[in-house]
């Protein structure tokens, strides 16, 4: 039987005494979200789908999360942040906020890869076949996406890449397995991929509330980042555009 992803609180009950309270921040796409998990359960969450306004909304959302925990006398152990790939500006804002909180409250910093995060709601629903592969995709303009390929146990099958999608891009995997495509870059690719083993799941977004199992594992394994030197995984260099008035 294929190895399967299991949420941490179901995987090993003996770990419950070592659980933690983590603030989760996700800003890799147009959606801005914040959550708090305690003992592997999400106890606070807030999502903003109104557009790429992270600089305006994130501070307020984080303040509300911190007020919630402070009012309930819940001490934090760490801050987890979605570390990319994704929007250059969004990732920069999220990581800067996470690092500021870590400095101010002397907390550990945990980095959660965005494409792994996208897989969590798929795995928790258990909708994929045993031998299925998961291909989370983030839109990178035109027919390009940031994508990775994982097993149902979240083991990487292929390195994360900036893919220009053609009918051949994922053919070697599609010829052998059902492959589930999801994320905000997936829908635009489906006509091009057009393979009987290709499955599209719509409506999957990287949200802070899904970060808990990935962040918790990293916390227990002491996979922390250097707060001073950590930077997001942009995948591609940021290219600033000249304002039209100057062209």
Image (cartoon, rainbow, N blue to C red):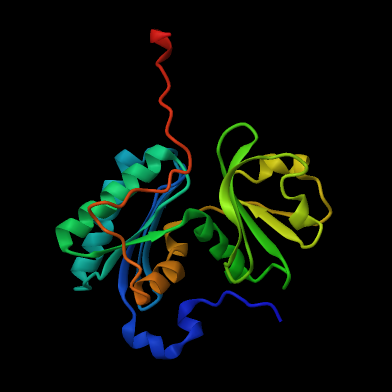
Rendered location of residue 151, percent (x, y): 64, 66
Rendered location of residue 177, percent (x, y): 77, 63
Name the quarter where the C terminus is drawn: top left
Q: Quadrant of residue 91?
A: top left
Kindly identify the residue that appears in the image at 47 percent across and 47 percent down: 85
Q: Quadrant of residue 111?
A: bottom left
Is residue 105 shown left or right of residue 191? left
Residue 243 sits above or below residue 34 on the image: above
Kindly identify the residue that appears in the image at 19 percent across and 68 percent down: 71
Which of 159 and 238 lies nearest the eye of the viewer? 159
Residue 235 sits above or below residue 64 on the image: above
Name the quarter where the N terminus is drawn: bottom right
Which of 155 and 180 lies nearest the eye of the viewer? 155
Rendered location of residue 207, percent (x, y): 46, 56
Labels in figure, total: 0
Kindly identify the residue that appears in the image at 28 percent across and 60 percent down: 65
Rendered location of residue 112, percent (x, y): 42, 60
């Amino acid at each position: 039987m294929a190895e399967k992803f299991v949420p941490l609180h179901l995987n090993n009950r003996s770990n419950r005494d070592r659980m933690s309270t983590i603030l989760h921040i996700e800003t890799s796409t147009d959606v801005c979200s914040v959550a708090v998990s305690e003992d592997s359960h999400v106890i606070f969450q807030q999502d903003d789908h109104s557009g790429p306004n992270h600089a305006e909304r994130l501070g307020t959302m984080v303040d509300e999360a911190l007020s919630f925990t402070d009012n309930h006398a819940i001490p934090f152990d760490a801050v987890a942040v979605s570390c990319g790939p994704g929007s250059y500006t969004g990732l920069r804002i999220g990581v800067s906020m996470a690092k500021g909180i870590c400095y101010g409250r002397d907390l550990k910093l945990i980095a959660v890869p965005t494409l792994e995060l996208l897989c969590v709601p798929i795995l928790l629903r258990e909708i994929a076949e045993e031998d299925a592969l998961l291909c989370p995709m983030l839109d990178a303009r035109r027919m390009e996406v940031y994508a990775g390929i994982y097993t149902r146990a979240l083991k990487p099958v292929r390195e994360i890449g900036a893919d220009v999608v053609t009918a051949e891009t994922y053919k070697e995997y599609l010829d052998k397995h059902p492959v589930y495509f999801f994320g905000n870059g997936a829908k635009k690719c489906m006509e091009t991929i057009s393979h009987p083993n290709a499955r599209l799941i719509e409506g999957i977004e990287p949200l802070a509330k899904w970060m808990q199992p990935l962040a918790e594992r990293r916390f227990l394994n002491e996979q922390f980042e250097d707060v001073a030197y950590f930077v997001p995984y942009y995948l591609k260099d940021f290219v600033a555009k000249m304002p039209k008035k100057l062209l």
